[in-house]
Image (cartoon, helix red, strand yellow):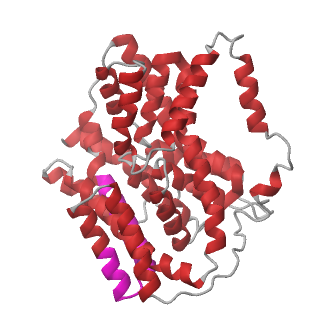
Amino acid sequence: MKQGPSESIEPHASGQVPLAALFLTFLKIGSTAFGGFMALISIVQHYAVERKKLLTQEDMLDGVSLATVLPGPVAVNVVAYVGYRVRGLKGALVSTAAVILPAFLLLLGLSYAYFQFGQIPAVNRFFQGFVPAVAAIILVAAWNMGVKAVRGRIEAIIALMAAGLLLGVGGFWISVAIIAASGLLGLLLLPGTRSKPATQSPGNAGATPPEQRSGGRTSPLHGAALGALSAAPILGFNTALLVKLAVTFGGMSVLLFGGGYVFIPLIQHVVVDNYSWVTRQEFIDAIALGQVTPGPILISAAFIGYKVAGLAGAAVATISIFTPPALIMLLCTRFLDSIKRSAGITAGLRGIRPAVIGMIAAAGVTVAMTAPSTWISVLIFGTVLVALLRFKIETAWIIPAAGIAGLLLY
């Protein structure tokens, strides 16, 4: 079965990928990306690299490497990177909004039900089916990347060492140390080549560089934001409270290093202890609800925003938690394009890429270890491996099927 949602991504005669097609594809990715940030990255890699050839494996690995050492949710930053590579700033905005939207809408509905009825129906068996499937998806992504990026003994050793360190020790600083050490090993042991200036792919042909687009004028997005804030009092919104939500979540977002789970103590301190926006139990429930939705765990910010200021609060908290890190990611992507022309930098990246592959494989093993220890998990895991490697089935079909299998079999 090779037909799927991503088939809609095809360049027009102008050579550009339509923004509507980009939005639809990432909307579908966001609807099925259960299992944490590495699952989302693996699905994006499957679509953008394996199926549609919008990026090379090297470009994708460079994006993952950059997102790993920058603040913010790694997966969403990678999505912004891919959208930027395909259609510039508009592509980054469309892709990021689309991939977050399904989780936002689902959590909004769950938040309403939570505060209206006090509890959420149990769906554990359905979500248990996701775990072995997600592990298989991540490991297949690591394999596909490794086939092209691991070209010799040195790269293989770097990949194995990175996986071993992450599995044996783990933690954010270990991840940063892996990236730094592998880049140094690449610089010392692997030959680099002077890269040519980046050429435009069919997806971003004709895209204007960000610094040339504004022409000194206020962007439509900025104008819309100012208009919304101006209209807030008329619509009954508490403007001061919405601004406080935006500043609070936006400020915390640039302090987020190491993934959503590292962020939990900080956000709890601010929203529970400092502002008393939610109770401790409500905060725990917000994190739990964020884990049962597709996409990043930081979507839990929508729950808190909803409690504080309703629908507007949920939207403001969500936009604020994801936007600043994504902007930092795009700025650094521009910088990366320039420095990649250096032979030394390309050698360093040759060392970093297999390390990232090892880290992805370690994430797949970690996810697999959390699956229920039954023959059902083995069956789902093996079936997904065959479906991806042998039949090239779309992940958009695999994730829901795994959930149904879990509901029926566990």
Query: Is 212 placed left or right of 321 in the picture?
Result: right
- Check the image and report above or below for 405 versus 293: below
- Magenta stretch containing residue 159, yes or no? yes
Residue 409, relative to residue 56: is it above or below?
Answer: above
Name the image quarter holding the C terminus: top left
Residue drawn at 44 percent across, 18 percent down: 112
Residue at horizontal 52%, vertical 25%?
A: 314
The answer, for residue 191, to whether it is visible in the render is yes
Stretch in magenta: 133-160
The residue sitting at 46% across, 59% down in the picture is 69
Magenta span has 166? Answer: no
* Residue closer to the observer: 78 or 166: 166
- Outermost residue toward the left? 374
Number of labels in the image equals 0
Q: Quadrant of residue 364?
A: bottom left
**In this view of the protein, which residue sits in the foreground, 398 or 332?**
332
